[in-house]
Amino acid sequence: MNLIYRWYSNAPGDDLQIQIALFEEGQRIFDAVLSLTAEPLDARSAPRAVLAYPLMTVKVAAGIYWEALRLFLKGVSLHPHPKRSH
């Protein structure tokens, strides 16, 4: 948990890119990029967006728990949060 986090982003416009890089002892150990493109919100696309996003939330939550189950079944040990360990 003792890492250096560096966030990068361009100014929002027609597209938006956000990057996070994690460093440990000067070495990059993780890098993630999110690239988004703006789309118009009109009478046709609004109902689709309202229906799609709640389902996307369920899909992401299910994916997180699925990966946690896979790690548990592989026998990966759990580590308590540093501030909560006694």
Image (cartoon, rainbow, N blue to C red):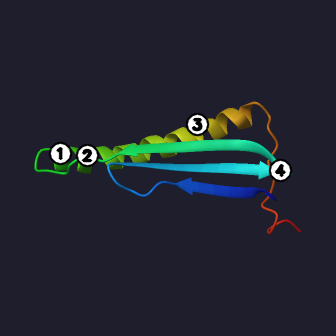
Estimate the x, y position of residue 61 in percent, counting from the top left. 50, 46
Q: Is residue 83 above or below residue 73?
A: below
Q: Which mark is residue 4?
A: none
**Front-most of 83 and 9?**
9
Q: Is residue 38 above or below residue 80?
A: above
The mark nearer the N terminus, 4 or 3, is 4
Q: CA distance from mark 4 to mark 2?
A: 38 Å
Residue at the farthest right position: 86
On the image, numbered disc 1 is attached to which residue?
Answer: 45
User: Dot 4, how many residues are within 10 Å of its Cα: few (below 14), some (14-19), or many (20+)?
Assistant: few
The mark nearer the N terminus, 4 or 2, is 4
Estimate the x, y position of residue 11 in percent, counting from the top left. 43, 58
On the image, numbered disc 2 is attached to which residue?
Answer: 39
On the image, numbered disc 3 is attached to which residue?
Answer: 66
The mark nearer the N terminus, 1 or 4, is 4
Q: Which mark is residue 26?
A: 4
Indicate left or right for 39 with 60 as reference: left
The mark nearer the N terminus, 3 or 2, is 2
Q: Quadrant of the N terminus?
A: bottom right
Q: CA distance from mark 3 to mark 1?
A: 31 Å
**Disc 4 vs disc 2: which is toward the camera?**
4
**Front-most of 11 and 77?**
11
Q: Secondary structure at mark 1?
A: helix
Residue at the farthest left position: 43
